[in-house]
């Protein structure tokens, strides 16, 4: 791979920047920059988050928004210039785009022309997209238009709901490498892309900057109601309705506790209505979205962390929720479910407790068990922190991604000689 001034120059293509619900991308960008890589970030739309992420100020990369809504004239001019300069390549890319009978594909094509024009003027030699739907589609079209190689990371909803097997195969066929964040996803993708895999498919876990998460021994219950924390987008796959039902069961058993739910999303009103219906207004609080630095402080004072993930009706599911890693790094004992990649980070009875999805009673049993046993809380918390340090540090995982990009770049140069 070509380098400038001894440093790689890589373009990241993401949906929006920065998103509170996608701190794993922010962590990766910070980690890769620390390794000396020069980055430029391209976002397909502006973020709608009302709460800023202060960590984004630590990123040095220039951010360029490719939104057609805000760059319609520029995108149109880019398309004309690309057509005049390379009419055959332009028309071939249009035909390829039209093969993917998918809503919004032409919008992605025009964003790709805008991106391609920037790439032609710049010095980036590799693109890396996050999420297999629109960001990778735009990146693939930009590759067709410019020849610049690319890789992408696939996550969760993008592969289980939003991207067809045909499109996944096309993206994998032209990418130099396909990364995903769990072994569960890697096995699933392997069945979807088939021969397009060709050794390109890799699992690299998301990493945490462990300096942000001070390990605090599990809190003793000193008379105050213990706090059970959950942090999530308020969507079906997070299983928060089951957590509320488990809280109802705990209250019926006479257990004192407080549930705090951090986050926002389309199910907030229905979840709040469930709390009212069950008479849990004094036991369950919705805190809304919070700045990440404030969330890190909350981890230091809570007793337990619960995230009873499920597979949604449309097939959507988590990979490994970043908040599970954060709670484990902070010394908070965790309860979750063996959905998707979660068993890869939590071995039940070792680093946390896993209960069957859609099982509020079993969830209540696990929470009650932890509330009753300081020894179990301490045991699980220590093992969980060790697991995070071993497998989920941002230094290790960013180095893995960088090594992969360097390797595929070297292979590309070898083939072009």
Image (cartoon, rainbow, N blue to C red):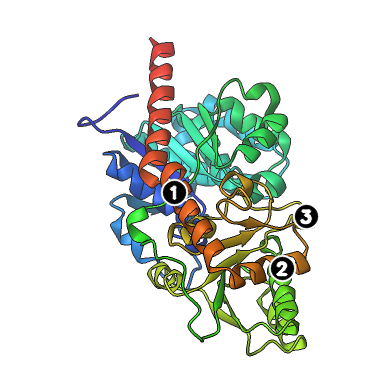
The mark that comes first in sequence, 1 or 2, is: 2
Measured as percent of width and height from the top left, residue 280 is found at: 69, 86
Q: Nearer the viewer, mark 1 or mark 3?
A: 1
- Left or right, 130 with respect to 233, comes to left
Residue 97: quarter of image: top right
Q: Secondary structure at mark 1?
A: helix
Q: Which residue is mark 3?
A: 314
Q: Give how far apart the Cα atoms at labels 3 and 2 are.
A: 28 Å
Q: How many marks?
A: 3
Q: Is residue 2 left or right of residue 289?
A: left
According to the image, label 1 marks what residue?
386
Residues at marks 1 and 3, CA–CA distance in whole angstroms: 35 Å
Report which quarter residue 127 is drawn in. Answer: top left
Residue at 40% of width from left, 12% of height from top? 414
Nearer to us in this view, 238 or 134: 238
For the C terminus, give its image quadrant: top left
Is there a contact, CB below 8 Å, between mark 1 and mark 3?
no
């Amino acid at each position: 791979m070509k380098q400038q001034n001894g440093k790689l120059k890589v373009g990241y293509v993401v949906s929006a920047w920065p998103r509170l619900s996608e701190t794993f991308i922010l962590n990766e960008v910070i980690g890769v920059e620390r390794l000396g890589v020069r980055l430029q970030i391209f976002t397909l739309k502006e973020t709608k988050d009302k709460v800023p992420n202060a960590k984004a100020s630590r990123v040095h990369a220039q951010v360029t928004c490719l939104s057609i809504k805000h760059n319609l004239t520029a995108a149109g001019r880019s398309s004309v210039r690309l057509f005049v300069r390379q009419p055959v390549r332009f028309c071939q890319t249009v035909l390829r785009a039209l093969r993917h009978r998918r809503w919004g594909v032409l919008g992605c094509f025009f964003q790709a022309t805008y991106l391609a024009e920037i790439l032609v003027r710049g010095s980036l030699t590799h693109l890396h997209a996050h999420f297999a739907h629109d960001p990778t589609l735009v990146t693939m079209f930009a590759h067709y238009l410019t020849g610049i190689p690319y890789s992408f990371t696939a996550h969760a909803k993008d592969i289980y709901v939003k991207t067809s097997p045909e499109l996944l195969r096309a993206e994998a066929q032209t990418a130099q490498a396909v990364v995903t964040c769990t072994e569960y996803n890697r096995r699933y993708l392997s069945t979807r892309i088939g021969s397009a895999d060709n050794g390109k498919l890799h699992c690299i876990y998301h990493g945490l900057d462990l300096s942000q998460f001070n390990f605090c021994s599990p809190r003793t219950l000193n008379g105050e109601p213990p706090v059970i924390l959950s942090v999530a987008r308020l969507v079906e796959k997070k299983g928060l309705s089951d957590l509320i039902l488990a809280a109802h069961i705990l209250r019926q058993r006479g257990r004192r506790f407080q549930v705090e739910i951090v986050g926002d999303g389309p199910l907030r009103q229905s979840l709040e209505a469930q709390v009212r219906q069950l008479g849990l207004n004094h036991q369950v609080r919705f805190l809304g979205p919070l700045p990440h630095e404030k969330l890190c402080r909350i981890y230091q004072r809570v007793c337990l962390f619960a995230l009873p993930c499920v597979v949604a009706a449309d097939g959507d599911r988590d990979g490994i929720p970043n908040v599970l890693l954060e709670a484990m790094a902070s010394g908070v004992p965790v309860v979750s479910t063996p959905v998707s990649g979660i068993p890869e980070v939590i071995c039940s009875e070792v680093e946390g407790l896993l209960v069957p999805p859609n099982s509020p009673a079993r969830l209540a049993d696990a929470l009650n068990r932890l509330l009753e046993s300081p020894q179990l809380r301490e045991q699980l918390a220590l093992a969980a922190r060790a697991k995070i340090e071993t497998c989920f540090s941002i230094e290790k995982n960013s180095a893995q991604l960088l090594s992969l990009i360097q390797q595929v770049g070297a292979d590309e140069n070898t083939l072009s000689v």
